């Protein structure tokens, strides 16, 4: 059963040809209450729910098809408070957090999913003296130091999330 995507009460539900309990329900992406929920064909608890990206409270939560605790949450990229947190579907400790590149307080933190010694250093697209350097959080000496894009002398140092005593 399929209806038009312009109305919020128009739903689509389809049963999987392989797994009869695997269902898909989708509503309109125009309205904020429109939802999309899909069960994985392999894992019953793997879900995908997405709301409209036009509104500020629009959220997207997706679980990994391999790991049930692998989640992705994303808000609208238009507003400054939008955040994106995604875990790797292969490595559950691999995280990525990114804010909007339009605003000066935007930050990006990313670990390498393949090489633990790989580092990433990125300068702010708005303030050239705003730098970010991070090493892998898998080792004890991994550090994270970032200067504020507004106050150049303001620094932030974060210890490893895996080893709390690492410096």
Image: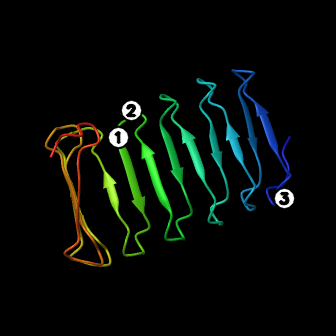
User: Which residue: 47% across, 36% down?
Assistant: 70
> In terms of depth relative to the viewer, which is nearer, 3 or 146?
146
Q: Relative to 80, is 166 on the left or the right? A: left
- Contact between marks 2 and 3 (CB within 8 A): the answer is no
> In terms of depth relative to the viewer, which is nearer, 114 or 55?
55
Residue 51 lies, in percent from the top left, at 67, 54
Q: CA distance from mark 2 to mark 3?
A: 37 Å
Secondary structure state at the residue bearing disc 3: loop
* Mark 2 or mark 1, whichever is nearer to me: 1
User: Which residue: 75% across, 21% down?
Assistant: 20
Answer above or below: position of 33 versus 122: above
- Which of the image's four quarters has the N terminus? top right
Q: Return the residue at label 1.
A: 94
Q: Return the residue at label 2.
A: 90
Secondary structure state at the residue bearing disc 2: loop
- Contact between marks 2 and 1 (CB within 8 A): the answer is yes
User: Which residue: 84% across, 58% down?
Assistant: 7
Residue 102 lies, in percent from the top left, at 42, 74
| Label total for image | 3
Q: CA distance from mark 2 to mark 1?
A: 8 Å
Residue 106 lies, in percent from the top left, at 38, 68
Answer above or below: position of 167 versus 100: above
Colour mapping used in the image: rainbow
User: Reading the chain from its start, which is encountered first: label 3 or label 1?
Assistant: 3
Q: Relative to 116, is 126 on the left or the right? A: right
User: Which residue: 62% across, 30% down?
Assistant: 40
Residue 7 image label = 3
Q: CA distance from mark 3 to mark 1?
A: 38 Å
């Amino acid at each position: 059963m399929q209806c038009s995507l312009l109305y919020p009460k128009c739903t689509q539900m389809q049963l999987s040809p392989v797994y009869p309990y695997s269902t898909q329900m989708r509503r309109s992406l125009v309205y904020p209450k429109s939802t999309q929920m899909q069960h994985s064909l392999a894992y019953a608890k793997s879900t995908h729910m997405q709301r409209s990206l036009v509104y500020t409270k629009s959220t997207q939560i997706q679980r990994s098809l391999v790991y049930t605790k692998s989640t992705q949450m994303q808000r609208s990229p238009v507003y400054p408070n939008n955040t994106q947190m995604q875990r790797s579907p292969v490595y559950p400790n691999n995280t990525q957090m990114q804010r909007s590149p339009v605003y000066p307080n935007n930050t990006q933190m990313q670990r390498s999913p393949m090489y633990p010694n790989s580092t990433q250093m990125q300068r702010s697209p708005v303030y050239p003296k705003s730098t970010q350097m991070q090493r892998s959080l898998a080792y004890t000496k991994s550090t994270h130091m970032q200067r504020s894009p507004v106050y150049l002398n303001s620094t932030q140092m974060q210890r490893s999330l895996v080893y709390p005593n690492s410096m």
